[in-house]
Image: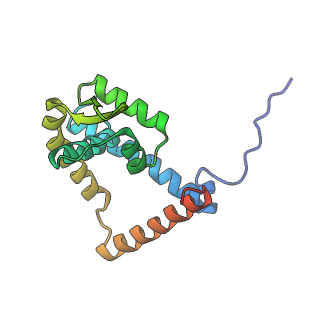
Amino acid sequence: MRITKTKQSDCGPRCCREDHFGALVSQTSRVVRRAMDARVAADVTPELTGVRGMLLGEIVRANKENRDVYQRDVEQWMQLRRSSVTAILQAMEQDGFITRCSVEKDARLKRLAATPKGVAYHERIRASIDNFERALQYGIAPEQQAVARSVLERVLANAQSIAGEQ
């Protein structure tokens, strides 16, 4: 019995993203997120990812401004499903970065608050993400950055419209 390799298409690993704009955007998003997670883990602490760091920053800012933050706010900010946000918040709470406090007016609501540990890490996380952003944009002229931002905002709006989110 002779074993033969399955015939591969002539298209290499770049094929899908060359043919489909959405695939390029999706792949770029995944790689950027992994790179940011690695940077924050290396610069600050392996307990945090870039996304968790950004979320912690939003919670710290809201707490400093005496604004209440709830899980539904995080769902809207990050455009994530409730189950994903629940998992992120549970891990951040378990690692001691945030607490969830009951609200008197509605026992179902839990206000998010940064712990002293979360506040202490906040500046280091912000510096790490700022450095990551500079490295990510290296060699891209401000005019090109503005065009890219405009195009990505339009792509996001189109995708939200297609998904029925607007």
Which quadrant does the N terminus fall into?
top right
> Where residue 159 appears, x then y in whole percent?
56, 60
Number of numbered discs overlaid on the protein picture: 0
Q: Is residue 8 above or below residue 24?
A: above
The residue sitting at 39% across, 67% down in the picture is 149
Relative height, residue 29 to residue 142 (above, below) = above
Point out the image quarter for the C terminus: bottom right
Residue situated furthest right in the rendering: 1
On the rendered structure, is 118 left or right of 91?
left
Q: Position of residue 16 (x, y in %)?
A: 63, 55
Q: Is residue 89 above or below residue 54?
A: above
Where is residue 133 shown, x and y percent of the image? 28, 56
Q: How is the image coloured?
A: rainbow
Q: Residue at x 31, y 35 (%)?
A: 105
* Residue located 26% across and 40% down the image: 56
Q: Nearer the viewer, residue 22 or 110?
A: 110
Say which quarter of the image contains residue 71: top left
Looking at the image, residue 96 lies above or below residue 52: above
Residue farthest to the front? 105
Residue at 38% over, 50% down = 77
Q: Position of residue 100 (x, y in %)?
A: 29, 29
Closer to us: 13 or 74: 74
